[in-house]
Image (spheres, rainbow, N blue to C red):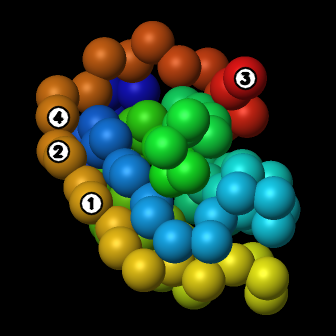
Amino acid sequence: MAEEAGTTAVRAQILVSGRVQGVGYRAFAVRVASRHALLGGVRNLDDGRVELDVEGTRAAVDALVHELKTGPPAARVTKIETEWKQATGRFSEFSIWY
């Protein structure tokens, strides 16, 4: 995914803290990322956070981060950390990683 709508793809590693495990947060992230045509994946971390590794346009990633702040109804997000990186083009879909 080198170009999409004339905008260079970016990669972001996103860490979400709060009550985000056991509340359908990963499935929510897949739905939102897919709606924004993003590629990558999401997984639970042992420390209780959720990690997303995502690639797409900067605008699409920003839209995802905005929606991640709310999450599904049972979630309570307290913090989101985003580290921007260079896109790799290695992802072909957005899925839950185990």
Q: Callout 3, which amino acid?
A: Tyr
Tag 1 and tag 2, C-beta contact below 8 Å = no
Q: Earlier in the sequence, mark 3 or mark 4?
A: 4
Q: Earlier in the sequence, mark 3 or mark 1?
A: 1
Q: Earlier in the sequence, mark 3 or mark 2?
A: 2
Q: Is residue 34 visible?
A: yes
The residues bearing labels 1 and 2 have C-alpha atoms spaced at a distance of 10 Å
Determine which of the numbered discs, if any, sits on residue 46 in the image: none
Which residue is at 41% across, 27% downward?
1
Percent position of residue 81, x then y: 27, 60
Q: Callout 4, which amino acid?
A: Lys
The residues bearing labels 3 and 2 have C-alpha atoms spaced at a distance of 23 Å
Tag 3 and tag 2, C-beta contact below 8 Å = no
Task: State the residue in front, 23 or 71.
Answer: 23
Q: Considering the numbered disc 4 on the image, is that residue within a helix, a strand or a loop?
A: strand
Determine which of the numbered discs, if any, sits on residue 98 in the image: 3
Percent position of residue 54, x then y: 44, 40
Residue at which label 4 appears: 85
State left or right for residue 11 relative to residue 17: left
Task: State the residue in front, 96 or 62.
Answer: 96
Q: Residues within 10 Å of mark 2 (few under 14, many from 20)?
A: some
Residue at which label 2 appears: 84
Percent position of residue 78, x then y: 42, 80
Residue 81 vs 83, above or below: the answer is below
Q: Callout 1, which amino acid?
A: Glu
Residue 59, image quadrant: bottom left
Q: Split into 4 quadrants, where in the image is the C terminus?
A: top right
Determine which of the numbered discs, if any, sits on residue 81 in the image: 1
Q: Nearer the viewer, mark 3 or mark 2?
A: 3
Which residue reaches farthest top? 90
Q: Residues within 10 Å of mark 4 (few under 14, many from 20)?
A: few
